[in-house]
Amino acid sequence: MKVHIEGIPDNMIANNLTSSYAIHPGEIIKDELEARGVTQKQLAQETGIPASVLNAVINGKRAITTEYALLFEAALDIDADFWLRFQSDYNKQIAKSNPDFMSRLKKVRKIVAAF
């Protein structure tokens, strides 16, 4: 949701800016584990997520699913909706950084505008 302040261009408001570097939610999990002194192996055992899968999530090679988000919520006491929104925002930012996809999107928008 964009923030609008009268007299200030929307693209000059920090809340409306998109980071040039997409941060995968796995990076936040990694930071949480470090801060709590918990290992990936411990979290994997606690949640029942295979260690290799958890490692792939933490290293940004695998998405956080609804099930994983709920397990992380139970284990880390961080709301599942946070993880799901973060993953969705990450996915959207990756898509928007793909020039081929953005070109395709632009063509679709032109077609729809003609109706």
Image (cartoon, rainbow, N blue to C red):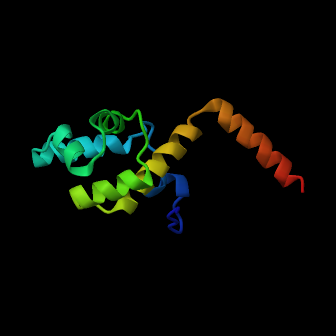
Left or right: 67 in relation to 28: right
Q: Is residue 112 visible?
A: yes
Q: Is residue 17 visible?
A: no
Total marks shown come to 0
- Residue lying at the far bottom in this picture: please name it: 6
x 13%, y 46%: residue: 35
Q: Quadrant of residue 29?
A: top left
Between 22 and 51, the one lying in front of the other is 51
- Give the quadrant of residue 44: top left
Query: 17 or 80, which lies in front?
Result: 80
What residue appears at the point 31 percent right and 55 percent down from the top-left corner?
71
x and y, in percent, of residue 21 in the image: 42, 36
The one of 8 and 29 positioned closer to us in this rendering? 29
Could you tell me residue 19's position as x and y percent?
43, 42
Question: Considering depth in this image, is 13 or 32 the residue closer to the camera?
Answer: 32
State the image quarter where residue 49 is shown: top left
Asked if residue 27 lies left or right of residue 114, the reply is: left
Position of 82 relative to 90 (above/below): below
Tell whether 65 sits left or right of 103. left
How far across and how far down the image is residue 81, in percent? 39, 62
The residue at the point 23 percent across, 61 percent down is 77
Whether residue 71 is situated above or below residue 96 in the rendered picture? below
Q: Residue at x 22, y 56 (%)?
A: 76
Percent across and percent down for residue 31 are: 21, 43
The residue positioned farthest toward the left in the image shown: 37
The answer to whether 69 is drawn above or below residue 94 in the figure is below
Q: Quadrant of the C terminus?
A: bottom right
